[in-house]
């Protein structure tokens, strides 16, 4: 299973968000997409998930063009987890995860569908929440429900848009470990947009760092997260410290002279 | 592991509860349909009421009922009660589908301006029908011309409301405000029609605009029943797709749903259903807003059940309101729109005050 994009471009209101991005994602890997705010990470992942139609360029799934594939078949291969669950009319956790079976269900819910949903709920340790309404859950629980729904699609690739952005550190680790397990035990390819460079560094196999001019660097985290590269993309100085699991990226306070309010004369 | 008696699955437990609720609502509806036929200005006992109906169905002639009594039951009350049920089902389930496909809790035929749009369309048909199609044709096909006029303007309204909302990208609030603005516009159009039309047409238009079910005839029931059944089945068929919208548009698209086409289908079919009803009953507000929300609270947001439940509750509310309208100031009656507004408007305000964060 592989995703291959070539020269992908997408513009919103005639303002180009991503331009001519090409890369390849491989099976059984945890891939992170990082980069500064507004650089087009979410847009890129939505193009991959068949939510946005790119203006230029093509996304290939196993050599086949995504745009030409049957939408239901695609839904059985690509799962998508949005940054935030947006529900006006709240479903229960069970109903929400069952939606992931939509590509398989004609009208009647089969026993096999029920089994799959229950198994996923149990695996993510949210079975006890099955009859609760999603809107009443905490941020971490909501994120797990969204991941569970994507898993119910039985996809070979899961695309996630900042899965840890609104979580505290214990839930961040919990969610990241769930994702890592999918890669290690289920041979699912995980592609996640991540803001937190340290999470990206310790969990991913491959990191893509997006900069102004497209993909600035790609490869193993220790190759990408170097003081030189990060200085260029984020414009800050960092220190890389060797840690237990991986290297840690610590931003340094800027040495450029700061301005105190008294220095400003209007 | 040996599982001698497999325990009931989580899913079947949840479904069973919803099915019981639906059965309960159906039974209650049948009960009040049966009872409201026996109520009215003329004092006809329960036994006589059913005696007349049963004799009519079985064509037996055991008891001799007076033609007046028979007329009241068979030609006045029965079609009226059935029209209330059909109109209630149509408005209730349309409201729930509009809310779901537009992802907007305030959406309903009334708040989106479809009701006044259809009323304007029907008004034009009434006033200009003779002029365009000739008197003889309108005498025979008048109801159909009115339906087409109402449907066309209902469709135009929902198209305009959507267009304005998509230009502005304001989401929920813009949609409703656009509906309100269009409602005013169409009200002005209706006033213009009234002001300029001739005396006899004015009378016809005024009676029609007052709304209510007192003009119910068998022909209305016969025309509306197949339209309602077709639209309802079609909407229920869409319910899995509509469900995916509960997870957000992006997720729905990822699940293989063509969101824009789903929205278009939902809007066109609900506009058809409500404008057909409106062309016979005039504007009846708030049923399409109140019934779905009560159902969302008691049966949840799974559209496979919600659409049916909203229809049933819409029928229950409208029938109760209409029966009250018939009885409150006996021997005359109130237009049912007044009663649904008196009950519905406070509910609407309650929702505005109680709204959850990010709800709309």
Image (tube, coloured by chain):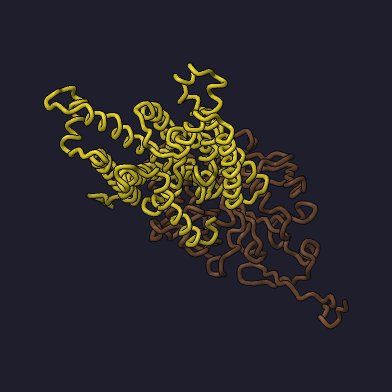
Q: Is residue B340 left or right of residue B258?
A: left
Front one among B99 and A170: B99
Q: Is residue B68 above or below residue A151?
A: above
Q: Residue at x 49, y 28 (%)?
A: B200
Front one among A5 and B174: B174
Q: Is residue B248 left or right of residue A59?
A: left
The C terminus of chain B: image quadrant: bottom right
List x then y, in percent, for residue B101.
52, 43
Q: Is residue B261 visible?
A: no
Q: Is residue B34 left or right of residue B209?
A: left
Most distant residue in the right direction: A265
Find chain A in the image and tell me its colour. brown
Q: Is residue B45 visible?
A: yes
Q: Is residue A87 above or below residue B101?
A: below
Q: Is residue A119 left or right of residue B353?
A: left
List x then y, in percent, for residue B27.
26, 43
Front one among B217 and A180: B217
Most distant residue in the top direction: B136
Query: Looking at the image, how many numbered discs can be counted on the residues?
Result: 0
Most distant residue in the front direction: B199
Q: Residue at x 84, y 83 (%)?
A: A262
List x then y, in percent, for residue B8.
28, 50
Front one among B218 and B238: B218
Find chain B in the image and tell me its colour. yellow
Residue A176, located in which quarter of the rendered image? bottom right
Q: Is residue A217 above or below residue B316?
A: below
Q: Residue at x 52, y 47 (%)?
A: B111
Residue A230, located in which quarter of the rendered image? bottom right
List x then y, in percent, for residue B236.
42, 37
């Amino acid at each position: 299973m592989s995703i291959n994009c070539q020269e992908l471009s997408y513009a919103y209101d005639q303002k180009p968000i991503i331009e001519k991005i090409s890369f390849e994602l491989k099976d059984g890997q945890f891939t992170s997409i990082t980069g500064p705010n507004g650089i087009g990470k979410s847009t890129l992942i939505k193009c991959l998930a068949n939510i946005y139609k790119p203006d230029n360029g093509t996304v290939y799934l196993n050599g086949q063009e995504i745009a030409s594939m049957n939408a239901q078949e695609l839904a059985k291969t690509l799962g998508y987890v949005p940054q935030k669950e947006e529900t006006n009319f709240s479903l229960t956790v069970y109903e929400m995860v069952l939606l992931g079976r939509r590509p398989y269900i004609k009208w009647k819910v089969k026993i096999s569908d029920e089994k799959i949903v229950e198994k996923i709920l149990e695996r993510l340790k949210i079975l006890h929440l099955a009859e609760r309404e999603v809107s009443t859950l905490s941020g971490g629980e909501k994120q797990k429900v969204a991941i569970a729904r994507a898993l119910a699609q039985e996809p070979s690739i899961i695309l996630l848009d900042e899965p840890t952005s609104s979580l505290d550190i214990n839930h961040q680790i919990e969610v990241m470990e769930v994702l890592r397990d999918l890669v290690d035990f289920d041979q699912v390819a995980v592609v996640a947009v991540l803001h937190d460079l340290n999470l990206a560094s310790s969990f991913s196999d491959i990191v893509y760092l997006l900069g102004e001019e497209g993909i600035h660097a790609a490869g193993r985290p220790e190759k990408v997260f170097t003081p030189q590269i990060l200085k260029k993309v984020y414009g800050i100085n960092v220190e890389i410290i060797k840690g237990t699991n991986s290297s840690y990226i610590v931003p340094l306070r800027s040495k450029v002279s700061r301005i105190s309010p008294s220095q400003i004369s209007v | 592991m040996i599982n001698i008696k497999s325990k009931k699955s989580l899913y079947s437990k949840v479904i069973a509860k919803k099915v019981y609720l639906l059965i309960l609502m159906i039974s209650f509806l049948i009960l009040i349909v049966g009872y409201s036929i026996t109520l009215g200005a003329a004092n006809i006992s329960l036994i006589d009421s059913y005696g007349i109906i049963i004799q009519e169905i079985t064509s037996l002639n055991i008891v001799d009922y007076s033609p007046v009594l028979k007329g009241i039951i068979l030609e006045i009350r029965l079609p009226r009660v059935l029209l209330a049920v059909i109109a209630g089902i149509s408005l209730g389930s349309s409201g729930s589908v509009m809310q779901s496909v537009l992802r907007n809790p305030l959406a309903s035929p009334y708040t989106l301006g479809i009701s006044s749009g259809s009323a304007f369309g029907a008004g034009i048909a009434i006033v200009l029908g003779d002029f365009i199609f000739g008197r003889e044709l309108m005498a025979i096909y008048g109801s159909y011309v009115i339906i087409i006029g109402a449907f066309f303007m209902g469709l135009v309204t929902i198209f305009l409301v959507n267009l304005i909302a998509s230009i502005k990208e304001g989401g929920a609030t813009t949609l409703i405000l656009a509906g309100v603005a269009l409602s005013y516009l169409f009200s002005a159009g209706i006033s213009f029609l009234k002001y300029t039309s001739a005396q006899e047409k004015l009378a016809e238009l005024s009676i029609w605009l007052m709304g209510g079910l007192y003009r119910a005839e068998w022909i209305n029931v016969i025309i509306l029943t197949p339209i309602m059944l077709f639209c309802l089945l079609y909407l229920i068929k869409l319910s899995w797709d509509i469900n995916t919208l509960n997870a957000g548009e992006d997720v729905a698209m990822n699940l293989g749903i063509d969101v824009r086409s789903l929205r278009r289908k939902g809007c066109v079919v609900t506009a058809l259903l409500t404008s057909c009803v409106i062309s016979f009953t005039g504007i009846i507000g708030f049923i399409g807003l109140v019934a779905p929300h009560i159902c969302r609270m008691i049966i949840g947001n799974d559209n496979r059940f919600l659409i049916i439940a909203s229809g049933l509750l819409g029928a229950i509310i409208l029938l109760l309101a209409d029966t009250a309208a018939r009885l409150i100031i006996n021997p005359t009656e109130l237009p049912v729109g007044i009663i649904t507004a008196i009950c519905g408007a406070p509910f609407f305000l309650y929702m505005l005050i109680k709204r959850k964060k990010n709800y709309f």
